[in-house]
Amino acid sequence: MIKRDAEKKLKRLAEEFPAVSVIGPRQSGKTTLVRSVFPEKPYVLLEDPDTRAFAYEDPRSFLAQFEKTGAIIDEVQRVPELFSYLQGVLDKYNRPGQFILTGSQNFLLMESISQSLAGRVGIIRLLPLSMRELFRGGFPIKPYEEYLYTGFFPRLYSNPIEPADFYSSYIQTYLERDLHQLKQVHNLSTFQTFLKMCAFRNGQIVNYSSLAQDCGITHNTAKEWLSLLLTSCIIILIRPHHKNFNKRLVKMPKLYFTDPGLAVHLAGIQSPDNLIYHPLKGGLFESLIVTEFLKCRFNQAKEANLFFWRDQHGHEIDCLIEYRGTELVPVEIKSGRTVNNDYFKEIAYWNTLSGNPPGRSFVVYGGDQSQQRNAGHLVGFSDLDPVLLYLK
């Protein structure tokens, strides 16, 4: 098992709350993580029809089995009615770490928690593996095109499976099971087209009208379906920062897939070599770096503190990290491996507007050499530690 950075925080939350919830996309490693951290707890999977029927039909008796031992309840969103009864058990015993809950549908799980378990549950989001976790686990550093193509789902690193086979199965599972549970998509074929169109927009500012037109759906349906992808932790949206420095700003968010391999497969890219000159490579590389930053935050059970900045003249900073609530750290993301002065052009412009010092400015690029320059820090894609310090 590859040791996860979230393990330390998960243990801490289990010492502070009577229940801990681990949420994230399917196959991100939630079950493996919680079972390795809490091996003494009984494990219950609510995907199993008989177990799910028991929990739904007689929730009191179902939970009574675990009043003394506690339990890991996997895919708990399958029986949302359970949360109301769970509240009584937690209040009765008030023991830290009694129940560990996992789920792959963010909205259903979070809605149930906010209604029934507010103040009783610690929450941690688990995305697929980070590059840092892979390197620490003994996997060698590879060209970033390999990571874009393969993605970071743990199963791809623990089993000999082709990424194309994995993602084909993943998409079908998502379409046939998760969306069926949510019951908000009636035409799965059109929704699969919508997924592909989102993949082609990975790393771009959302344009609902364009997205709707390309899929033959309404503007409102595009918004609703994008919300479903957020619900399922398939994508994340990064908001523009509000500080305008007297310039009109773009107001729509940027769209990123939480795993680049899924976006690559949806876009029909068939090998890492196809990515070398592919027009989507820049956006995919940007999503790789942004989600590495998000993983660092989520593994600490913290909310995202990432934004982007773009004014009406086209000046843009790919990522702004809000540090300590008041300071902003600009990060430009470039997929090229050969550095040129233009890499620091937008950083210099933004620093002039904001008064931010070059020593707190970064360019992450596709090469492997990190160095300090007059305009800011140059950071190789595989050594993000200088930036991750601002995400603690």
Image (tube, rainbow, N blue to C red):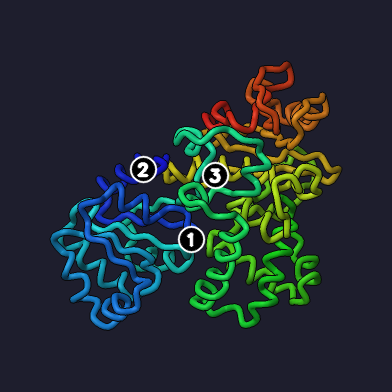
Identified by mark 1, the residue type is Arg
Q: Which mark is residue 196?
A: none
- Contact between marks 2 and 1 (CB within 8 A): the answer is no
User: Which residue, given by chain and number where applicable, does mark 3 sit on?
Assistant: 294
Identify the element where label 3 is drawn: helix
* Disc with the residue nearer the chain's start (3 vs 2): 2
Residue picked out by circle 1: 26
| Residue 211, image quadrant | bottom right
Q: Residues within 10 Å of mark 3 (few under 14, many from 20)?
A: many
- Residue placed under numbered mark 2 in the picture: 7
Q: CA distance from mark 3 to mark 1?
A: 17 Å
Spatial CA span between label 2 and label 1? 18 Å
Compare residues 93 and 74 and report the one nearer the observer. 74
Q: Visible in this render: residue 392?
A: no
Horizontally, is 128 left or right of 44 in the view? right
Q: Residue at x 63, y 50 (%)?
A: 260
The answer to whether 221 is drawn above or below residue 166 in the figure is below
Say which residue appears at 60% left-offset and 66% top-offset. 227
Q: Residues within 10 Å of mark 2 (few under 14, many from 20)?
A: some
Q: Secondary structure at mark 1?
A: loop
